[in-house]
């Protein structure tokens, strides 16, 4: 079995830049999705009152997806801080 080569700092930096770019794209898509669902909920309910819109079932599901993506973001940030000392 061949020994595993440890990536150079430059290679690691490039990997994490790609990870950051991919995660940013995911966050952006999820935010756009939530915004679209919020607008649809406002139109369905005939109001922009946040206290009413937040009760819409579809908007609630969109917010759940947003929460899950933010959890992934937090886990990645914790991983970077713990394992590679990145802040």
Image (spheres, helix red, strand yellow):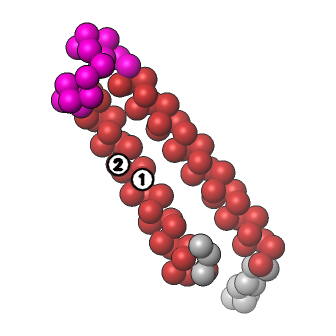
Mark 2, Cα crowd under 10 Å, few <14 / some 14-19 / many 20+, is few
Whole-number angstrom distance, CA of label 1 to CA of label 2: 5 Å
Q: Are the residues at dot 1 and dot 2 in contact (C-beta closer than 8 Å)?
A: yes
Q: Residue furthest front?
A: 49
- State left or right for residue 77 relative to residue 5: left
Q: Residues within 10 Å of mark 1 (few under 14, many from 20)?
A: some
Question: Residue at (78%, 71%) from the top-left corner?
Answer: 11
Q: Is residue 49 visible?
A: yes
Label the magenta part by its dominant secondary structure: helix
Q: Which part of the image, by quadrant, shows the C terminus?
A: bottom right
- Residue beneath disc 1: 70
Of helix, strand and loop, which one carries label 1?
helix
Viewer-proximal residue among 52 and 8: 52
Q: Is residue 48 left or right of residue 3?
A: left
Q: With respect to residue 68, does 42 lie above or below?
A: above
Residue 44 in sight: no
Q: Which residue is mark 2?
A: 67
Picture coordinates of residue 30, whole percent (x, y)? 47, 38
Closest to the observer, 75 or 3: 75
Span shown in magenta: 39-56
Q: Position of residue 78 (x, y in %)?
A: 48, 72
Q: Position of residue 74 (x, y in %)?
A: 44, 62
Q: Is residue 82 above or below residue 34?
A: below
Q: Position of residue 68 (x, y in %)?
A: 36, 50
Q: Where is residue 62, by image quadrant?
A: top left
């Amino acid at each position: 079995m061949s020994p595993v080569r440890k990536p150079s700092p430059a290679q690691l930096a490039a990997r994490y830049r790609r990870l950051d770019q991919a995660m940013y794209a995911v966050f952006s898509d999820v935010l756009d999705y939530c915004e679209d669902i919020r607008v649809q909920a406002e139109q369905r309910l005939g109001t922009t009152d946040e206290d009413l819109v937040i009760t819409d079932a579809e908007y609630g599901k969109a917010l759940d997806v947003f929460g899950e993506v933010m959890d992934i973001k937090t886990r990645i940030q914790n991983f970077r801080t713990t394992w590679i000392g990145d802040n």
